[in-house]
């Protein structure tokens, strides 16, 4: 891996004229998936065990896929970097999971969930995929209930629902504030059953560090055993990446510390297209940072916005404590600006509004870097007990972290990086442009367009893992002649050598500054120039600063210990190497997209009242980037997006 | 804050461990316990020494990856929090803090404060699931679950599998962990068909992993970050008794 030196960004990326084909079958969207399922080829039950499938990642998408394909009879190997598949970061999702059950009889339907998701994504998702997601959403709830996921119930024993941002129906299923945990445990237990049955071999504390491509097909991965440092190739017939998102490029995010973009990035460097890298979600309700020691940011579930009211002092610079600011001097800005959705406005819109408040001098808290989320009215209306039942664990967590009691004084919140809509490009069948490489869950560029609605990540991860991949992956196996591959293949040796080379190089820098030092610095650049709002000038600047920092890293980083043992510094260093490169691609993509849409806000493109201004004429496409060498500009492929069902309109929540 | 830390250092599973003392200055009261260790590690790296290895991931109290014995108490002095959610305002300037890994026969040390908890996964694999393959599920509201039952299942299902219960138990027992999963699944109508087999199979695996027995001391409940109730152990014992009478657990 060579060091990229400072590039001039004046050149525009070369793009390929031929449109990228998402391979969406033709026909009416309502029956497309049913028909496709019938038309796809199957693998005979007795033949399935002959095919080996590698699944990297054990979160909602990975664990559900491994369990389901194991149940079907395939020979699965599943890898995760944690000490147990139960720890994957899906576990931390708090609020809930959407489904179009219409149990509330409030006008919901598959079509409405589809519509809300396309609109919520600011018209930058593929319609056919989103429709399919809405269509399988109900089966996910059925499956999870059968597994014993203890969803909230009403006294009659039926399932309860609540509302989430960007929807006017109540379609979110939840298990207290621990929905992600309970859904993950459901998938983990299904996985455990298959491990016991011998269909799945589980490898924990094992990290994927390269993809093996033989004759144009994904045929394996290179892994490092994190306990011993041993680097080995693992071969298979199909490789599935379910490795989550890359929000940790910002250093401070709501992701777990170990979440990383290494698997998808190294697949990108083997030829997989990376789609819409600049589409990142900044979640509006997180606890504001308090100081230099900060190692991560903590999310306070969006569900809190069902009962909490967001406000700041109307007068900039007002430093009075919240209880001394009278009602008429409080600015409930979401309720005033977006009366139809109010405090449940979508995430991108709520986040930017919070930024505007803080930037205009109305920020609250000791560092003036937050806004209030106030439960006083809800407590007055419903009583403290009801609020405690609904959100008790979140209030406790808030108190642990801040030392403040949110039953008595308003919470302080501020936006933080949370989710990445961008990821590896996949077609309708969830396969990347490299045959045999499938990408599911947050790791793909997915169904959320430029902004994901709350409670939709769990839905998508499980839709991909339980229902979509287990239907499309067999079709690939059944319609492909898979030659036998061995570890002697040149591509295998080359991939193993590549991993060893990167490892050695990191160990041999022997500089003076820690990995975390560089990661923090990268995070500051990304947050400043490629965060909640972006400009061409700022992005150009980031594209100069990142390579400078990266070059300094390769000169002066200190990775302690040795490569042949558990070495957390080495693990972090390897991930940071990829974040430098991924950060550059994010900036390049943000610079290329001369419009504002969803989570991507370019200051140059806004309406007079500060809302995102899309440019459908020129940018209604998926930007899929192809690696062209460390020192070369990547090549841009465009997948045009057609909207035949949901009319392209300005997204309004007023 | 200025602290004196006594930390267990152990190169790997084969080598002997020992306590090493460190003086740490400039700790913010607002930082978490793990951020305090980050600060120590930053200083160790600056001195070209190897940082202290410890497991952690989500740092929001839900993944179950972190877990340290802090002054002899699993997850430290504050009730109902994980190590990552413990904040330094719980300590005083000048304190000496002793930090050890989970100590249990079934959790061998990998390095420093990192231990191997894969025994927990094998207990779940022995029967901690409802056998329903993808696609077999009936419509979700077909089986009503009374709210009280669903709530009890959720109380038990809140377990994060951190292992504090084992570390705190003088017998190194995994009864609370095992009982929590049994109570979660055995409280629900969906869990009934495998109820008694599940109890026997999981408890057998727990014994095979080298965890000790329960003598009703209650240390596990006291340190559990998710406040899992000791009552679930009673429920497990009842299910085991019935299972034995019925001759279950031989699949």
Image (tube, rainbow, N blue to C red):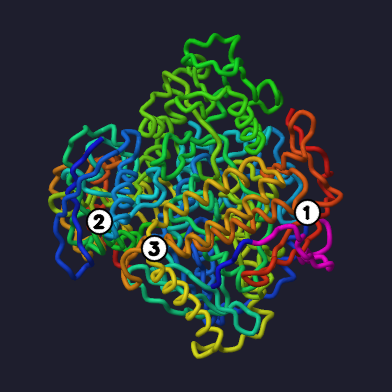
The span from disc 2 to disc 1 (Cα, nearest Å) is: 54 Å
Q: Splitting the image into 4 quarters, where does residue B76 fall?
A: top left
Q: Chain of mark 1?
A: A
Q: Residue at x 22, y 63 (%)?
A: B108
SS under mark 2: loop
SS under mark 1: helix
Q: Which residues are magenta?
A: A7-30
Which numbered disc, 2 or 1, marks the residue closer to the eye? 2
Q: Residue furthest bottom?
A: A488
Q: Quadrant of the N terminus of chain A?
A: bottom right
Report the magenta stretch's main SS: loop
Q: Chain of mark 2?
A: B
Residues at circles 2 and 1 in contact by the CB criterion of under 8 Å? no
Viewer-nearest residue: B84 or A10 = A10
Query: Residue A85 vs residue B164: left or right?
Result: right
Query: Residue A539 vs residue B194: left or right?
Result: right
Q: Which residue is mark 3?
A: A511
Viewer-nearest residue: A597 or B187 = A597
How far across and down, in percent of the image, does residue B178 sit? Answer: 28, 53
Query: Residue B114 vs residue A120: left or right?
Result: left
Please check whether the numbered discs 3 and 1 fall on a single chain.
yes
- Choose the circle earlier in sequence order: 3 or 1: 1
Which numbered disc, 3 or 1, marks the residue closer to the eye? 3
Q: Is residue A544 visible?
A: yes
- Label ID, residue A30: 1
How far across and down, in percent of the image, does residue A382 sit? Answer: 49, 18
Which numbered disc, 2 or 3, marks the residue closer to the eye? 3
Q: Which residue is mark 2?
A: B113
């Amino acid at each position: 891996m060579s060091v990229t030196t400072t590039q001039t960004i004046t050149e525009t990326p070369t793009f390929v004229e031929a449109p990228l084909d998402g391979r969406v079958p033709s026909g009416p969207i309502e029956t497309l998936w049913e028909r496709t399922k019938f038309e796809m080829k199957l693998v005979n039950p007795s033949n399935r065990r002959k095919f080996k499938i590698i699944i990297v990642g054990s979160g909602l998408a990975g664990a559900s896929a491994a369990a389901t394909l194991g149940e079907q009879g395939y020979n699965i190997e599943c890898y995760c970097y944690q000490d147990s598949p139960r720890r994957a970061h899906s576990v931390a999702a708090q609020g809930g999971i959407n489904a179009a059950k219409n149990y509330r009889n409030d006008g919901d339907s598959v079509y409405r969930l589809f519509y809300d998701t396309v609109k919520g994504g600011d018209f930058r998702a593929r319609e056919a995929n989103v429709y399919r997601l809405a269509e399988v959403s109900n089966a996910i709830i059925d499956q999870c209930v059968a597994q014993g996921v203890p969803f909230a119930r009403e006294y009659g024993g039926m399932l309860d629902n609540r509302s989430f941002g960007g929807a006017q129906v109540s379609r979110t299923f939840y298990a207290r504030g621990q929905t992600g945990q309970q859904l993950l445990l459901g998938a983990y237990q299904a996985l455990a059953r298959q491990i016991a049955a011998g269909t799945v071999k589980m490898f924990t504390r094992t990290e994927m560090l390269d993809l093996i491509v033989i004759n144009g097909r994904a045929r394996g991965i290179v892994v490092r055993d994190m306990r011993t440092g041993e680097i080995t190739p693992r071969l298979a017939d199909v490789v599935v990446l379910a490795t989550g998102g890359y929000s940790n490029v910002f250093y401070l995010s709501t992701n777990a510390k170990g979440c990383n973009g290494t698997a998808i990035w190294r697949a990108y460097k083997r030829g997989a297209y990376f789609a819409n890298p600049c589409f990142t979600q900044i979640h509006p309700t997180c606890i504001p940072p308090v100081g230099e020691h900060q190692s991560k940011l903590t999310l306070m579930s969006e569900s809190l916005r069902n009962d909490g009211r967001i406000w700041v002092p109307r007068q900039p610079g007002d430093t009075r404590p919240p209880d001394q600011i009278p009602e008429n001097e409080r600015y409930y800005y979401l309720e005033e600006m977006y009366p139809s959705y109010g405090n449940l406005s979508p995430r991108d819109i709520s986040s930017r509004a919070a930024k505007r408040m803080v930037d205009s001098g109305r920020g609250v808290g000791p560092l003036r870097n937050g806004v209030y989320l106030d439960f006083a009215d809800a407590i007055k209306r419903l009583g403290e007990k009801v609020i405690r039942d609904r959100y008790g664990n979140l209030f406790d967590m808030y108190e642990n972290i801040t030392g403040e009691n949110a039953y008595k004084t308003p919470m302080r919140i501020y936006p933080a990086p949370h989710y990445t809509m961008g990821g590896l490009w996949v077609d309708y069948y969830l396969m990347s442009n490299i045959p045999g490489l499938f990408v599911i869950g947050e790791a793909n560029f997915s169904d959320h367009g430029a902004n994901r609605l709350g409670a939709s990540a769990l839905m998508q991860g499980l839709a991909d893992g339980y229902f979509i991949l287990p239907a499309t992956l067999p079709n690939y196996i059944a319609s492909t002649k898979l030659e036998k591959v061995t570890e002697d293949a040149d591509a295998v040796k080359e991939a193993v050598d590549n991993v060893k080379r990167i490892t050695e190089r990191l160990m041999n820098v022997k500089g003076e500054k820690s990995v975390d030092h560089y990661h923090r610095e990268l995070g500051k650049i990304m947050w400043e120039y490629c965060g909640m709002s972006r400009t061409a000038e700022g992005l150009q600047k980031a594209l100069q600063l990142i390579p400078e920092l990266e070059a300094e890293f390769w000169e002066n980083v200190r990775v302690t210990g040795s490569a042949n043992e558990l070495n957390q510094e080495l693990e972090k260093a390897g991930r940071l190497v990829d974040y430098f490169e991924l950060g550059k691609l994010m900036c390049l993509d943000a610079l290329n997209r001369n419009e504002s849409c969803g989570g991507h806000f370019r200051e140059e493109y806004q309406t007079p009242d500060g809302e995102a201004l899309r440019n459908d004429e020129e940018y209604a496409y998926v930007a899929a980037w192809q690696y062209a060498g460390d020192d070369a500009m990547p090549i841009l492929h465009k997948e045009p997006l057609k909207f035949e069902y949901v009319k392209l309109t300005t997204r309004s929540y007023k | 804050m200025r602290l004196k830390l006594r930390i267990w250092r152990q190169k790997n599973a084969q080598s002997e461990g020992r306590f090493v003392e460190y003086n740490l200055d400039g700790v913010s009261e607002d930082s978490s316990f793990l951020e305090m260790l980050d600060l120590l590690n930053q200083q160790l790296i600056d001195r070209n020494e190897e940082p202290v290895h410890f497991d952690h991931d989500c740092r929001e109290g839900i993944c179950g990856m972190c877990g340290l014995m802090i002054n002899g108490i699993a997850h430290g002095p504050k009730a109902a929090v994980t190590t990552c959610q413990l904040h330094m305002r719980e300590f005083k300037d000048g304190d000496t803090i002793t930090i050890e890994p989970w100590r249990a026969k079934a959790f061998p040390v990998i390095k420093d404060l990192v231990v191997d908890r894969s025994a927990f996964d094998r207990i779940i694999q022995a029967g901690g699931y409802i056998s329903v393959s993808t696609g077999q599920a009936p419509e979700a509201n077909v089986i009503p679950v009374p709210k009280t039952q669903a709530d009890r299942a959720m109380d038990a299902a809140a377990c994060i599998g951190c292992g504090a219960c084992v570390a705190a138990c003088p017998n190194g027992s995994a009864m609370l962990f095992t009982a929590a999963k049994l109570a979660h699944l055995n409280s629900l109508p969906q869990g009934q068909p495998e109820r008694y087999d599940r109890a026997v199979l999981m408890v057998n695996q727990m014994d095979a992993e080298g965890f000790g027995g329960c003598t009703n001391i209650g240390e596990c409940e006291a340190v559990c970050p998710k406040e899992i109730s000791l009552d679930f152990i009673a429920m497990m014992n009842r299910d085991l008794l019935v299972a034995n009478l019925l001759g279950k657990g031989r699949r």
